[in-house]
Image (cartoon, helix red, strand yellow):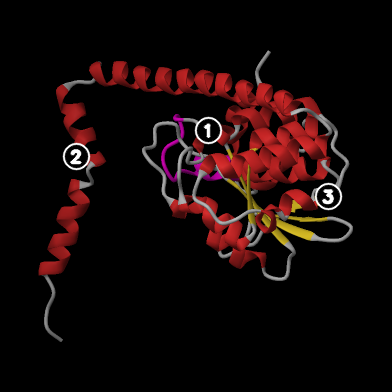
Amino acid sequence: MLTVRSRVLKFVDELAKTTGAFDELEKRVLQFSREQLVEALLECGAIPEAFDHDSSQEKLWAKYCDILLAMGLSELGLKASVIRARGNSADVLATGATYSLVGDAKAFRLSRTAKNQKDFKVSALDDWRRENTYACLVGPLTQFPNTRSQIYKQAVQKNVTLISYTHLRFLIENETRASLEELWNIGQQLKPSDVAADYWAAIDTVTASLSGKDLTELEAIKQLEIEKLKELGREGISYWERRIEQYHKLSQAEAVNRLIKAEKIEAKIRTIKKAISWEQL
């Protein structure tokens, strides 16, 4: 039986170059059971290495994460949906009885090197909040900075809640029905600090309290994410090892042509020719 990740990989490959791809993907993902949703939340934060950078598949995977975030918030009693607007907008809007929330879902490649503040869009989310009450950013726990980072200080100062898919999963699995405003308002409870451990300790405490569970149970779910990370890492390594094998089988001429194309050398030559053919008006 295919895992949820394997199924979605197939969906994305099938739909990436079709019209109405997002709508069809959303239709399929919305059919997930709660069990499939929590499984997906544990693994969606790692972009498949098989997707080319900035490809249609990669963009559709980002939308998949948005759909999961909206579904997760809906499971927690909010009315949530993916925002269709393009640019300068949050990805998800959720409303409760007394407040509204904008959210952004993040995913990263495990092969990518260090991430910076701009990857987490804390200031942008604060701007995108507009008339809404709260803002949150959800990402894989293992991809957030784990020592010090200005994103934690910014999150507190701007009251933008950083949470992981693991925390969201924990709340869903435990059928949390308490108001989540304490979580969305956590920036008001903390002193600005760039220390990761301080921030996540506060998130852990609130998450466990809202779900009515012990912190040790949350730690067990975090360990599941670490194990899943290793599995996803092996998936990525296998993909690149297969690529190496394929490259070894190329003829010299084909290998050279691929290198020229990869470095966009011919395009650079065309650009230079166009620049030097300039004539004075």
Mark 2 and mark 1 residues within 8 Å of each other at the beta carbon: no
Mark 2 lies on a secondary structure that is helix
| Residue type, mark 3 in image | Leu
Q: Give the alpha-carbon distance from disc 1 to disc 3, as whole Å.
A: 26 Å
User: Residue at the spot x=45%, y=29% of the render?
Assistant: 50
Under mark 1, the amino acid is Thr
Label 1 crowd (10 A; few <14 / some 14-19 / many >=20):
some
Q: Nearest the camera: 192 or 203?
A: 192
Q: Which residues are magenta?
A: 49-62
Pick whichever of labels 2 and 1 is earlier in the sequence: 1
Q: Which residue is mark 1?
A: 142
Please check the rendered image and state whether residue 54 is part of the magenta-colored stretch, yes or no.
yes
Q: Which residue position is annotated with label 3?
A: 78
Position of 170 with respect to 195 (left or right) is right
Q: CA distance from mark 2 to mark 3?
A: 51 Å
The residues bearing labels 2 and 1 have C-alpha atoms spaced at a distance of: 36 Å
Up the image or down, 129 lies above or below 110; here it is below
